């Protein structure tokens, strides 16, 4: 099972601020993912990475950006936060070369943009 | 049509009874299937995975897969109030590398 960490767990911030949500995993997983989930709603994939220097946009359009400079680290950045960005952001990782795509989730970051 | 469909519920089950959850998917080439449990305000946690047609049992949970009919189900036996949560079905498509999640079924186990 993956150890995957997200910080901050909760963030309240004003409109227009730049924010970075951190995600780190200690299992050496090549693949990492960012999902967005509103309360009681579906998970939406917004970004993913198959390894260092690899990033792709997910199924849901997002104004956020990501980077993957190190295997264990996959931060998500919002250059100018807006109230519409208020949501829960979940990071996940999985191991390459396995039979199946078993993803393990971090605890999530709850973002509130005022 | 959504790629992965689940009844949103809530599915109300008396304590001790069997909860039966269904999930259908559209990608006929899908190979791997997962059930996650998500408590309110928490992140999803993996309960079971299944790759072959038939049943797979793990404790009180049984996953059933029928690729010909493109559905996967989850049975929760001897349901407990602690099983009250949203259960997410996830499917790895033929292309691999990503999971597509259903909208989840909310289960409520009443004492």
Image (tube, rainbow, N blue to C red):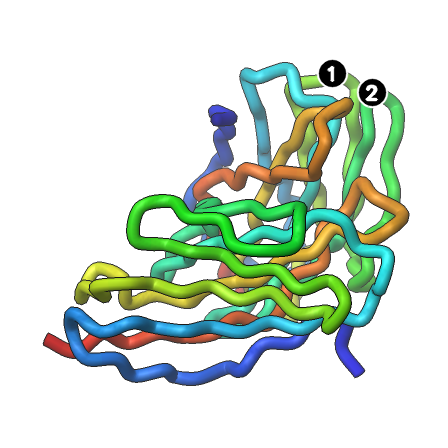
State whether discs 1 and 2 lie on one chain.
yes
Tell me the residue at 52%/62% (across/down).
B88
Q: What element carries label 1?
A: loop
On the image, numbered disc 1 is attached to which residue? A70
Q: What element carries label 2?
A: loop
**Left-right relation of A55 to A104:** right
Q: A13 or A68: nearer the eye?
A: A68
Looking at the image, residue B43 lies above or below residue B28? above
Looking at the image, residue A31 lies above or below residue B50? above
Quadrant of residue A86 within the rendered picture: bottom right
- The percent coordinates of residue A66 (x first, y second) are 77, 38
Looking at the image, residue B51 lies above or below residue B87? above
**Left-right relation of B48 to B54:** left
On the image, numbered disc 2 is attached to which residue? A52
- The percent coordinates of residue A76 (x first, y second) are 69, 40
Which chain contains the residue that carries disc 2?
A
Q: How crowded is mark 2: few (under 14 residues within 10 Å), some or many (20 or more)?
A: some
Looking at the image, residue B14 lies above or below residue A18? below
Mark sitting earlier along the chain (1/2) = 2
Q: A38 or B13: nearer the eye?
A: B13
- The percent coordinates of residue B15 (x first, y second) are 15, 73
- Determine which of the numbered discs, if any, sits on residue A23 in the image: none
The span from disc 1 to disc 2 (Cα, nearest Å) is 6 Å
**Left-right relation of A41 to A55:** left
Residue B37 visible? The answer is yes
Tell me the residue at 73%/73% (across/down).
B69
Tell me the residue at 28%/76% (across/down).
B108
1 and 2 marks in contact (CB < 8 Å): yes
**Left-right relation of A53 to A1:** right
Quadrant of residue A91 within the rendered picture: top right
């Amino acid at each position: 099972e993956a150890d995957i960490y997200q910080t901050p767990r909760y963030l309240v911030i004003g409109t227009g601020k730049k924010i970075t949500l951190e995600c780190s995993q200690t299992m050496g997983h090549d693949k990492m993912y960012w999902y967005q989930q509103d309360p009681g709603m579906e998970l939406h994939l917004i970004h993913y990475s198959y390894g260092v220097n690899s990033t792709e946009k997910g199924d849901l359009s997002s104004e956020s950006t990501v980077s993957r400079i190190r295997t264990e680290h996959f931060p998500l950045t919002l250059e100018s936060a807006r109230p519409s960005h208020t949501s829960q952001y979940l990071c996940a990782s999985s191991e390459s070369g396995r039979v199946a795509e078993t993803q393990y989730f971090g605890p999530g970051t709850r973002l509130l943009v005022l | 049509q959504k790629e992965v469909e689940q009844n949103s519920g809530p599915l109300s089950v008396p304590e001790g009874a069997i909860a039966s959850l269904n999930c259908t998917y559209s990608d006929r080439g899908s190979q791997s299937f997962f059930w996650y449990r998500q408590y309110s305000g928490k992140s999803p946690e993996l309960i079971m995975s299944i790759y072959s047609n038939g049943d797979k049992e793990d404790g009180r949970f049984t996953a059933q897969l029928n690729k010909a009919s493109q559905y996967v189900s989850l049975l929760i036996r001897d349901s407990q109030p602690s099983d009250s949560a949203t259960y997410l079905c996830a499917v790895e498509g033929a292309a691999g590398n990503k999971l597509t999640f259903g909208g989840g079924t909310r289960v409520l186990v009443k004492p």
